[in-house]
Image (tube, rainbow, N blue to C red):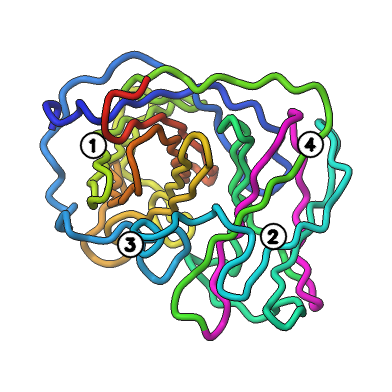
Amino acid sequence: MAGSRTGLKLGGFALAVAVVFGAAYGVGQLVGPVAEEPEPAAHEGMSGDTDMAEEGHGGGHDEAVGLPAGLQVSEDGNTLEVLSTGLAAGQPAEFAFRIVGADGHAVTGFEKAHDKLMHLIVARRDLSGFRHVHPVMAADGTWRIPLTFATAGDYRVFADFQPKGRAEGLTLGADVPVAGAYTPAPLPESALTAAVVDGYRVTLWGELTPGESSKLKLSVDKDGVPVTDLEPYLAAYGHLVALRQGDLAYLHVHPDGAPGDGKTKAGPNIVFYAEVPSTGTYRLYLDFKHGDVVRTAELTAVAGGHGH
């Protein structure tokens, strides 16, 4: 697949974020170019026609053919209402929000999607400072999660959820200012491999083609040895979020297969199918679990054209 990489460029950069929730995340950084792609693993077994997200999860195929997910604070009678104010860089805080229905009351009925009732994604508008956390809802419909924003700036928060009675999920987004001295971080230059702490390396093959289902394969190794015992995280061996540079359009993709289905191996390869809505530059965030720790690898991908 090496010859098909002209439409995709990848890179990684240091992620300096204070993590105050349960799982410890790794720090992405740039490493050298990758060798030729190995032969596809026999267990991948999924056609290129497959939609990028199933189970009605937010950020899926339906959003790709219309307005991308995460660009609206309100959709289909549901509104994301951020309750936290006065956030400051480096100061621990309890981040709170709620989903308000068309009747003006907080929504309290949700379906589980990938093991959770609510996925909260946080990223600074320069695409640094990524978090993926899972708040807890109180009886009055208020969601809360302890967060420390390590650096100042304008952040975007995404609430990814599925209300009860709705066939598909929603992803709503809102801007959140964090006070303090702000220095924008440039998006990393392209490369083909990202590394995370503790000797882990993530390599990605594939090409993002706007408007089409694109196969992306990520391979995880540790100290040069393929990892074949990845642990399930949110009912999968990998969890991938993509944000478009500029407006932070949100894509939430999930891998081919599932743990325990009798055909999906626990690494080293994780196969995703993603459909991006346009040409442009995207930041990819892969969460994977190994050794009972969740780590995040970050890569930059260009869909169409030549990008950076």
Mark with earlier residue (3, 1): 1
Residue drawn at 68 percent across, 77 percent down: 101
Q: Residue furthest front?
A: 66
- Mark 1 against mark 2, which lies toward the viewer? 1
Distance in Å between CA atoms under marks 1 and 4: 35 Å
Disc number placed over residue 207 in the picture, else none: 1
- Which residue matches tag 2? 135
Amino acid type, residue under disc 3 in the picture:
Ala
Check the image and report above or below for 109 versus 97: below
* CA distance for labels 3 and 2: 24 Å
- Residue 150, above or below 214: above
Image disc number at residue 258: 3
Question: Farthest right residue?
Answer: 86
Name the secondary structure under disc 2: loop
| The residue stretch that appears in magenta | 138-165
Q: On the rendered structure, is 290 left or right of 254?
A: right
Tell whether label 4 touches label 1 (CB within 8 Å): no
Q: Earlier in the sequence, mark 1 or mark 2?
A: 2
Which residue in the protein does label 4 denote? 178
Kindly identify the residue that appears in the image at 27 percent across and 30 percent down.
8
- Residue 290 in view (yes/no): no
Question: Label 4 vs label 2: CA separation?
Answer: 19 Å
Question: SS for tag 1?
Answer: loop
